[in-house]
Image (spheres, rainbow, N blue to C red):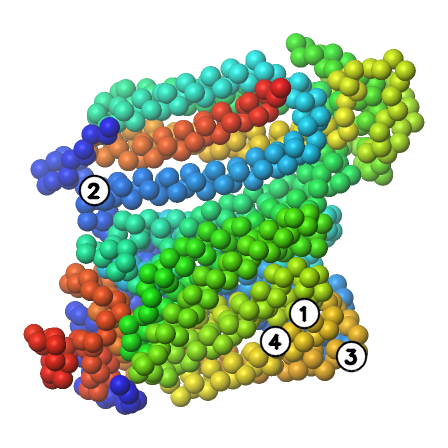
Amino acid sequence: MASPETTIPADLLPAPSAEGGRNYLNARTGIRSWIITFDHKRIGVMYLVSILVSFLLGGIFAMLVRTELLTPQRTIMDADAYNRMFTLHGAVMIFLFIIPGVPAALGNFVLPIMLGARDVAFPRLNLFSYYLYVIGAVFALFSIAAGGVDTGWTFYTPYSTSAGTHKAVVSIIFGVFILGFSSIFTGLNFIVTIHKLRRPGMTWFKMPLFLWGLYATGIMQVLATPVLGITLLLLIIERVFGVGIFDPALGGDPVLFQHFFWFYSHPAVYIMILPAMGIMSELIPVFSHNRIFGYRFIAYSSVAIAILSFLVWGHHMFVAGQSPLASMIFSFLTFSVAIPSAIKVFNWLATMYRGSIDLKTPMLYALSFFFLFGIGGLTGLFLGALAVNVHVHATYFVVAHFHYTMFGGVLMAFLGALHYWWPKMTGRMYSERWGRIAVGLIFVGFNLTFFPQFIMGAQGMPRRYYNYAPEFTRFHRESSVGAYLTAVGFVIVATYLLYSLFRGRRAPANPWGGATLEWETGSPPPVENFTTPPEVHDPYDYTDLEYDPAIGGYVRKRSMDRSSPHDAATTA
Amino acid sequence: MEPVSHEADATHEHPSRLAHHFDSPRQQAEAGKLGMWIFLVTEVLLFGGLFCAYAVYRANHPEIFVYAHKFLDRTLGGINTVVLICSSLTMALAVHAAQRSRKRSLVVCLALTLLFACGFLGIKYVEYKQKWEHGLLWGRLYRPVTHEAGAESVRATAPAATAAAAIDSMAGAVPDTSPVAPLVERSTIAPPPAGPPGLAQPRSADAHHDDEKPPNNVQIFFGIYFMMTGLHGLHVVAGMVVIAWILVRASRGEFGSHYFAPVDLVGLYWHLVDIIWIFLFPLLYLIH
C-alpha cells in the first residue's frame, strides 16, 4: 500500500488533536510548567533533549579520538589527553546516552499511551529520575572540567584507585552512581506501570512487544544496577578511605572489582539492546503492513535474554585469571544467550515475508539494524569462543563488535524510533527525502568506520592504544574517514528534525498506519493522553487501516462488515 | 489481613488521595505496594554485593574471620539485634493502628520506633568508638593496640604489632594515618624482623596455638565490617528521617483506614533494614 508524499495545504487539515489543537506541548507554558511537570510526555521530551546533548558530547570525544588516530604517532594531542578522550567517550556514551536512551527518552513518552493509561505509576518518581540524571550528568561534566579521567570507562582497579586526582575520578564515579539510581527508578516505574495500569482488556499477550522489551529491561535495570551502585561505592570508599578491598598490599583482590563491575555491565548491554529490539518489533510489522510473526516467541525471548544476561559476565574476564572451568561455563552460557536474539531476528524476517514493505525512513533504520546487529551479534559469538578470545581480547575486534551492536543495533533502532514517533511527539512531519539521505550516509559511514576495525583487531591492533604500528595506518585512516562521514549524516538528521519543528507539515494522528494505541490519539496527544478512553484491540492487526491521501495518514475503517476490506473508508 | 480501604466519596471528610492517573484507590495502593517491594529488591541487590565480598574473602581466608570477629562485642551486637526487632514490632503496630484509624496509637508506635532506632545507633556509636580506640580499623588504619582497655579484651600480642608493622613496611612510605591520640599506650616492643606477608611464619619450638598468632591482613575483616555496618547504619538513618516525616503527618491526622499506604510502605522498608541486620549479626559477630 504505497503512501505517496503529498503536501496538504494547512487549512485543509483537521486539527491534529481534539479541543482545537490543545495538546501536552501547549497546554501550559513557561519554564516552571516544564521543570516541575509530572506529565510523562514532557519528562520524556526533557530526557530526549538531554540525551541528545549527551550524544553530541560523546560524539565530539569520538571525533577527537578518531582524529588523533589518523597518524601512527601524535596527531593533535598527547597520550594522557588521548586516554582521557576515549575514557570520556565511553563513559558519556554509555551512561549518559545509551543506557537511559530508549527507555527514558522514548519509553517514557510512549509506554503509558501504548497501555491506554494516563501516566506512569509514579509520576513524581519519574521526575525525580530525570533530576537524578541531570545531577549525575553534572558530576560527570565536573569531572571533565577537573581534568577528566583516563582509566577507561571500566574503571579497573588498581589504576582507578590510585591514579589521577580525587576530584576528577571520584566525581565521575559518583556521577555514574547517581545515574544508576535514575535508571533503577525508571525501571521500577515501568514495571509497576505495566503490571497495574494496563487498560482493562489488555492482557499481557495483547500488549505491544515494545512494552515486553521495556518490561524485561526494567527487570534487568532493577536487579543489575544496584550491583553497579555498590561496586562504585566500594571504589570510592577504597580510594578515599583506603579500605583495601581491591588492594593486594592490604589483602584485597583487584580482580574482585572486575567480577563486580561486569556483573552489572554485562546485563547493562542487554539493558541497551532489549528496548531496541522492542522497537524493531514495532517498526517491522508496521512498515511491512503485516502482523508480527511469533508474538509469544518474541515476548518470551525478551524475558529469556533478561535472565540469561546475568549468567555470562565472566566472558569479559577470560584472560583475567579466572579458572578454565569457569571460563568454559561462561563461554557455553554466552553461546546460549545468542539464541533468543536469533529467534527474534528470524521472527522479524518472517514478519516481512509477503508483507507490503514501505521504505520510509524508520524502516530504513530498522533494516540497517538487521544487517548491522546481525554482524555485531555474530561477532559476539567469535568473542565467546575461548580460543579466539585469547587472540582478540583487548583488540579492535572487540571495539568493532560492541560498536556494531551498540551503534549499529541500539542507535539505529533509536533513530528509527525517533523518526517513527517524531510526528506523534511533535505533531510535525520531517522531510522524507533528507531522512533517506541521512540514513544512507550514516549506514555507509558506520560500516567504513567499524568494519576495518574487525580486520585490524584480528591482525593484532590493541584497543585504547595511542600510538600504533605503521601497518595499521590504512585501517585507521579508513575508520576515521568513515567517522567523519557518519558525523555529516548526524548533522543532517539534526538539521531536518529541528527544521521540521518550525516548518514541518502538521502530522495526522496516524501517519504510518500503526495499530498500537498511541496512533489512536492526536499528534501531539492531549495532556491526558486520550480524549475518550481507547478501545483495546490487537496491536498488530492492520486490516482495518487505510491510507487517506486527504490527510496524509491512515484512518480506521468503520464499516460494519469487516470481512470485505474493500468498503469505502469513512471519514477520519 | 489488611482491612478494605474505603472508596473516597464526596461526603467523606477526608480529601481524596486518589491520583489522577489511577482508576481506583485499590489500584493505587496495589501499585504502591508493588513499587515498594521492587525497591526493596534493589536494596537486597545493593547489600548483596557486600555479602558477596564477605563470602569471597571468608571462603579464601577463613582464618582472618575466625580471628578478627572475636574483637566484636557479641553482647552489644545482641542487644542491637533485639532493639531492631522491637523497632520492627512497634513499626508493625503502627501500621496496624493506621489501618484502624487509631491516631494516638499510631503516633506513639512511630515515636517508639524512632526511639529504638536511636538506641541502635547509640550502641553502634559505642562499638565504633571502641574499635577506633583500639585501632581496629580498615586498611592502613589497622593498628591494633596491645594494651587492654575497658571491658573489651584485646588479644593483640607482639605478633599483631609485627604483622601491622610488616604490612606498613611492605606498603612503603606510608604517611602516618593514625587516628586521634589513642587513650591507651601503644606497644613499645620493637617489631622483630619479619618477612613479607604471604610467607609462612616460622613456627617456634613451643608450638603456640594458631589462635594466638594473628593471620595476615586482619584489616580486611574490619574493612568489610565497617562497610557493611556503615551502609546499614546509613539506611537506618534514612529510615529514621522518613519515619519522622510520617510521624509529623500522622500527628496531623492524615492517616486512617481510608489512607494508610505511606505508613504501610515505610513499614516495609523498615522491616528490610531490620532483616539485613539479622543477617549481618551472625555473619559478623557469631562466626564459629
Mark 3 neighbour class, 10 Å CA radius: few under 14, some 14 to 19, many 20 or more:
few
Mark 4 belongs to which amino acid? Answer: Phe
Q: Amino acid at mark 1?
A: Tyr
**What is the chain identity of the residue bearing mark 3?**
A
Chain at tag 1: A
Q: Is residue B107 above or below residue B198?
A: above
Q: CA distance from mark 1 to mark 4?
A: 9 Å
Q: Amino acid at mark 2?
A: Pro
Q: Which residue is mark 2?
A: B25
The residue lying at 57 percent from left, 35 percent from top is B51
Would residue A533 be found to the left or right of residue A465 on screen?
left
Residue picked out by circle 3: A471
Q: CA distance from mark 3 to mark 4?
A: 17 Å
Query: Are discs 2 and 1 located on one and the same chain?
Result: no
Q: Earlier in the sequence, mark 3 or mark 4?
A: 4
Residue A449 picture quarter: bottom right
Please report whichever mark, 1 or 4, sits nearer to the chain's N-terminal start: 1
Q: Left of A30 or right of it: where is B196?
A: right
